[in-house]
Structure formats: structure tokens, C-alpha cells
Image: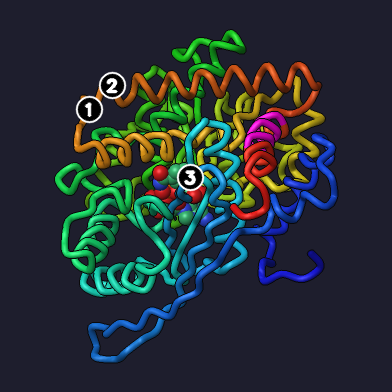
């Protein structure tokens, strides 16, 4: 395919990664475009009344990568950077992630180009509802199921579910996941991604023979994924020595109190103002020495410029796409000293527990929290073992191994079904 609407640095990253894996798997040239390019992309305009009386229109997108294994599944991002290329890249990564975890889904992603921090609660509700209203012809519990991502949360999912349900004339909880428990959500979904990251970090520490009690960690991003990861790691005895968000970065070799940080953010909405003593330049945080570095904010923060300078033992990718292909080439050379938990393995806890939420909603039968996490950890253990074994067998990086497993699952399903899905 020589021309496409998918462009930009994030899609270029997803394309380059895919081509690397396709070379490794020796996928025929003629099969590559079918595997990489999304099944469909929807662009919508979402007008809302602002609080000052003006009408403003926001652009929204949803990209559904493939429908070969079942409905598509993926988060919804409210951020100023959102464009169709970024959303498509995230949808592609979701496909490999779901396939690696063995979930019956293709990948999807959606979003609105907006800075959600500039909206009042009423405006946020109006925009969320309008977005879902525009998406009604294209989504459904067996077509495409949304979830939260950057800039959205349980409340936004509840508005999505309510808007969809009102149009159908009945409550359809299974249209989105990541809902509050009171609106048909599952126990554990809010914490699932972060607890899953912490669980895999625990497995990587075991693998390397490092005890959690002697380990230190730095977490970039203090939203859903970052704050829960930090809290769960601290619960496992890991000392959290650095955190950051879009407003501030803090570093203290003696350890930061994560519960205090969470209380501060709950009150102020941001990390800024927490402390003056431990504040550092945000760009320095990733380069400080630690055992575990968790980028849990945004894409492309580990690049060829800083990859040589990382001083961690484990890189646990809580965010999607934090490492550029240029950085990956460097990390590949540092394979013996730096253990990478690639995003599609590391942060899959969110979509795995979203899958559990969908299953429970469809069955109208809800599980105890212990069952949710027991099942999550079992799936994560299987994926972790598969990735380690594949990387060792083929002499490839963990990322290449994880993607090779995911891409092969989708390729084989497409091969079996034929050209349509
Ligand atoms: P969120 O909106 O809850 O939090 C994002 C955090 O990143 C905020 O603390 C924000 O201040 C911070 N941030 C933004 N710009 C930053 C910068 N320049 N430097 C440092 N911090 C910055 O979002 P989230 O749901 O926690 O998602 C974070 C990442 O994890 C995204 O890449 C997302 O795609 C990925 N992810 C999320 C889930 C999920 O279940 N929420 C699942 C898998 C992957």
C-alpha cells in the first residue's frame, strides 16, 4: 500500500516495529499490508456548548484494526496530541497485545483531540456523551468495546455506557469496560494495569535474582497506571525513589511515600506542590540510577538520545509505545544488562481484566476480586514464560518475541478465515 491516511511519528513507530517482526517471521510482502493497516477508521465532529455560551467542535476518532478473532477492544484517549495516526498505532499495538494474551479480540483505539484538563465537569460530560452518540453506528458489544486510556476514567466510561444504553432503550453494560462497579464494572479493573505491571516486575526481579526488598524504582506518570504501579511496587517492598507527572518530578534516594503522593494528587489534581526539597528536572528522572524504571505516561520518551544513558536493570513499559525503534536497537545491544518488559506484555493487565469485565457483563455473573487477580496473574505468567522462552530460542529481544507471538496468532487466524475479516 503506497499511500494511506495513517501517518505521523507514532504510526511510523508501529509500522517500523511491525516490519522488523515481519522480516523475522518471513511474512510474505503481499500479506503485510493486510496485517498492518486497520480494517476501518471513523472520524467524527463533536460539537458541545461551552460554559461561556460558545459552541465548539472537537475532532474524534476510532480505529478498528481487525475483526478476525472477535470484536475489537481498546481504550479512548482524550489528549491534545490525538490524531488518526496516533490512534491507529495504538489500535495496532492493542491487536498484538490481545493476541499475545490469548484474548478473543482485535485491537481498537479511539480518542478526541482535546486537553481534558481545560474542560469543566459539565463540558467533559457533554463531550463524552456526544462522542459516544456519534460512534453508536460503529460500535457494539460484539463489534467494538471501548475502555479508558489517557485522559479518560471510570466516570467517562459510565457516560459512554449510559448514552449507548439510552439509544438502545435498555441497559447494555457490556458496551464498554473500565466502568465503575456500580454501573456493571468488575472489581479490580481500575487497579488492573498497575497491579499487572507490578506483578510482572516481581517476576522479572525473581528471574534476575534481585529481592524486591532491596530494589528501587522510578515511575514516570502518576495517573491510573503510574500511581497504582508505584503503590503496588511499594506494597511488595520496592522503594519508590522517583515519580513525575506533567507538572513536576520528584526524586529522593531515601524513598518517597506513595500514599502521601496519592493523597496530594487526589486533593490537588497534580503532583506539583508536593515538595520543594526533592523536586528535580523532569528530563533527568529517567536517567537516575534505579533497579526498575517504569515509563507510565506517554509514547516516545525513551529515544536513541537517552537509551544509552538509562541506569536501570529492568525497564517495565507501563505506557504504550514509550520506546522508539531507534532506542530499541540500543537496548538490544544492552540486552545482558537491561531486562525489558515490553508494553504489549507489561501493561496487558488492563485489557485482560477488561475482558473479564465483558465476560461478567455478558453472563450477568460477577466474580470476587481474588478470582479476578488470580486469573489475571495466570494469564500474565503464561505470556511471561512464552516471551522469555521465545526470546531465548530465537536469540531476539523480548519485544521482538512478544510481537512475534502476537502477530503470528493474527496471521494464522487471517490465513484460516480468508480475505474478509
Ligand atoms: P492517565 O491520564 O490516568 O495518566 C497519565 C499520567 O501521565 C498523568 O499523571 C499525567 O500527568 C502524566 N503525564 C503526561 N505528560 C507527562 C509528561 N510529559 N511527563 C511526565 N508525566 C506526564 O493515563 P493512564 O491511563 O495512566 O495511561 C498512561 C499510559 O498507560 C498511556 O500510554 C496509556 O496508553 C497506557 N495504558 C493505560 C492503560 C489503562 O488501563 N489506563 C492500560 C494500558 C496502557
Please report contact status of discs 2 and 3: CB closer than 8 Å, yes or no: no
Q: Position of residue 22 (x, y in %)?
A: 79, 42
Label 2: how many Cα within 10 Å (few below 14, some 14–19, many 20+) = few
For marks 1 and 3, the one nearer the N-term is: 3
Q: Secondary structure at mark 1?
A: loop
Q: How is the image coloured?
A: rainbow
In the picture of the structure, the residue carrying the numbered disc 2 is 371
**Camera sees residue 168:** yes
Residue closest to the eye, 294 or 31? 31
Disc 3, SS: loop
Q: Nearer the viewer, residue 313 or 374?
A: 374
* Residue placed most toward the observer, 363 or 399: 363
Q: Quadrant of residue 316?
A: top right
At label 1, counting other C-alpha atoms closer than 10 Å, the crowd grade (few under 14, some 14-19, many 20 or more) is few
Query: Is residue 30 left or right of 259 when viewed as pictured?
Result: right
Q: Most extreme residue toward the bottom, as rendered?
A: 54
- Asked if the beta carbon under badge 1 is closer than 8 A to the nearest atom of ligand 1, the reply is no
- What residue sits 48% from the left and 28% below the top? 253
Total number of numbered discs in the rendering: 3
Magenta: predominant secondary structure element?
Answer: helix
Element on which disc 2 rests: helix
First in sequence, mark 2 or 3: give its number.
3
Residue labelled with disc 1: 367
Q: What span is colored magenta in the figure? A: 401-409
Depth check: give the residue in front, 30 or 208.
Answer: 30
Q: Going by the image, does 243 lie left or right of 291?
A: left
Q: Which residue is mark 3?
A: 70
Residue 319, given in percent of the width and then of the height, sits at 52, 44
The residue positioned 79% from the left and 47% from the top of the image is: 19
Whole-angstrom CA distance, mark 2 to mark 3, is 24 Å
Can residue 142 be found in the magenta stretch?
A: no
Residue occupying the point 38% across, 79% down:
46
Amino acid at each position: 500500500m503506497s499511500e494511506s491516511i495513517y501517518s505521523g511519528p507514532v504510526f511510523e513507530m508501529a509500522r517500523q516495529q511491525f516490519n522488523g517482526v515481519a522480516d523475522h517471521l518471513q511474512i510474505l510482502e503481499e500479506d503485510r499490508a493486510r496485517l498492518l493497516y486497520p480494517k476501518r477508521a471513523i472520524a467524527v465532529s463533536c460539537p458541545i456548548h461551552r460554559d461561556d455560551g460558545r459552541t465548539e467542535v472537537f475532532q474524534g476518532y476510532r480505529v478498528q484494526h481487525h475483526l478476525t478473532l472477535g470484536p475489537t477492544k481498546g481504550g479512548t484517549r482524550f489528549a491534545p496530541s490525538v490524531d488518526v495516526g496516533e490512534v491507529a498505532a495504538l489500535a495496532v499495538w492493542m491487536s498484538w497485545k490481545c493476541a499475545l494474551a490469548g484474548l478473543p479480540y482485535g485491537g481498537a483505539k479511539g480518542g478526541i483531540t482535546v486537553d481534558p484538563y481545560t474542560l469543566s465537569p459539565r463540558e467533559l460530560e457533554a463531550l463524552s456523551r456526544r462522542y459516544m452518540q456519534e460512534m453508536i453506528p460503529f460500535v457494539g458489544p460484539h463489534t467494538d468495546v471501548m475502555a479508558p486510556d489517557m485522559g479518560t476514567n471510570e466516570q467517562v466510561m459510565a457516560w459512554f455506557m449510559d448514552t449507548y444504553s439510552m439509544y438502545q432503550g435498555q441497559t447494555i453494560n457490556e458496551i464498554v469496560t473500565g466502568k465503575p462497579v456500580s454501573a456493571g464494572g468488575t472489581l479490580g479493573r481500575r487497579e488492573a494495569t498497575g497491579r499487572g505491571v507490578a506483578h510482572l516486575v516481581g517476576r522479572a526481579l525473581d528471574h534476575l535474582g534481585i529481592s524486591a526488598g532491596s530494589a528501587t524504582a522510578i515511575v514516570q506518570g502518576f495517573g491510573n497506571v503510574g500511581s497504582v504501579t508505584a503503590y503496588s511496587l511499594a506494597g511488595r517492598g520496592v522503594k519508590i525513589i522517583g515519580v513525575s507527572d506533567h507538572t513536576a518530578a520528584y526524586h529522593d534516594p531515601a524513598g518517597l511515600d506513595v500514599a502521601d503522593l496519592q493523597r496530594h494528587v487526589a486533593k490537588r489534581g497534580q503532583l506539583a506542590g508536593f515538595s520543594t526539597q526533592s523536586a528535580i528536572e523532569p528530563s533527568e528522572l529517567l536517567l537516575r540510577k534505579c533497579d526498575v524504571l517504569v515509563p507510565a505516561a506517554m509514547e516516545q520518551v525513551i529515544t536513541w538520545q537517552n537509551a544509552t544513558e538509562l541506569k536501570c536493570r529492568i525497564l517495565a513499559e507501563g505506557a504504550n509505545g514509550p520506546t522508539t525503534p531507534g532506542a530499541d536497537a540500543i537496548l538490544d545491544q544492552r540486552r545482558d544488562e537491561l531486562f525489558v518488559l515490553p508494553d504489549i506484555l507489561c501493561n496487558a493487565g488492563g485489557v485482560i481484566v477488561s475482558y473479564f469485565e465483558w465476560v461478567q457483563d455478558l453472563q450477568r455473573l460477577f466474580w470476587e476480586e481474588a478470582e479476578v487477580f488470580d486469573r489475571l496473574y495466570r494469564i500474565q505468567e503464561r505470556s511471561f514464560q512464552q516471551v522469555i522462552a521465545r526470546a531465548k530460542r530465537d536469540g531476539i529481544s523480548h519485544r521482538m518475541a512478544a510481537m512475534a507471538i502476537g502477530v503470528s496468532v493474527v496471521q494464522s487466524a487471517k490465513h484460516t478465515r480468508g480475505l474478509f475479516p
